[in-house]
């Protein structure tokens, strides 16, 4: 049984995404991005959560561009979460995004360096320190 059959064209894409097809996952991420940008209460919220989910899944394949996209999504969603009064979570998300870009920059990514320079001007020093701690934890974990 296909539990997603009522979603029409989405059903086979969801199946491919579930089986690890990166292009299908990126397609789902693009749909979530459209929803996150929708100026309708509720739709933007659901879209933001789905965008974070699909961005994490895409980034798990290890491609630089998907990791940078995830960092941008974390930045976006952290502002959204912070506006809803969940400052601690927002701070962790922002720090995670900075840590991702910082690690990629250390590996020589020009795109990550540019994104990090842009983002670093907008975050407080405490978050940069937290991002460095996160980066060290990842390095220590191997």
Image (tube, grey):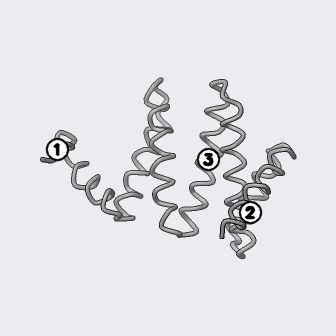
Query: In what element is the residue under mark 3?
Result: helix
Where 110 falls versus 115 (above or below)?
Answer: below
Which mark, by number, is residue 102? 2
Q: Position of residue 116 (x, y in %)?
A: 75, 58
Residue appearing at x 48%, y 67% in the figure:
61
Q: Does residue 98 appear left or right of residue 38 in this picture? A: right
Q: Position of residue 101 (x, y in %)?
A: 69, 61
Direction front: furthest residue: 141
Q: Does residue 69 appear left or right of residue 46 in this picture? A: right
User: To which residue does mark 1 refer?
Assistant: 5
Question: How would you rate the neighbour count of disc 3 (Cα within 10 Å): few for under 14, some for 14-19, many for 20 or more?
Answer: many
Where 24 falls versus 110 (above or below)?
Answer: above
Query: In what element is the residue under mark 2?
Result: helix
Query: In what element is the residue under mark 1?
Result: helix
Quarter of the image that includes the C terminus:
bottom right
Q: Which one is earlier in the sequence, the residue at label 3 or at label 2? A: 3
Where 21 falls versus 121 (above or below)?
Answer: below
User: To which residue does mark 3 refer?
Assistant: 74
């Amino acid at each position: 049984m296909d539990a997603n059959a009522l979603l029409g064209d989405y059903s086979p894409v969801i199946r491919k995404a579930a089986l690890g097809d990166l292009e299908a996952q990126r397609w789902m991420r693009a749909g979530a991005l459209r929803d996150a940008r929708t100026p309708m209460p509720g739709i933007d919220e659901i879209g933001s959560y789905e965008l974070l989910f699909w961005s994490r899944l895409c980034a798990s394949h290890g491609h630089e561009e998907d990791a940078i996209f995830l960092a941008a999504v974390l930045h976006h969603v952290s502002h959204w979460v912070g506006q809803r009064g969940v400052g601690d979570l927002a701070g962790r998300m922002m720090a995670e995004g900075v840590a991702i870009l910082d690690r990629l920059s250390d590996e020589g990514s020009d795109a990550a360096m540019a994104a990090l320079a842009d983002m670093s001007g907008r975050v407080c020093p405490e978050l940069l320190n937290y991002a460095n701690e996160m980066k060290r934890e990842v390095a220590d974990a191997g």
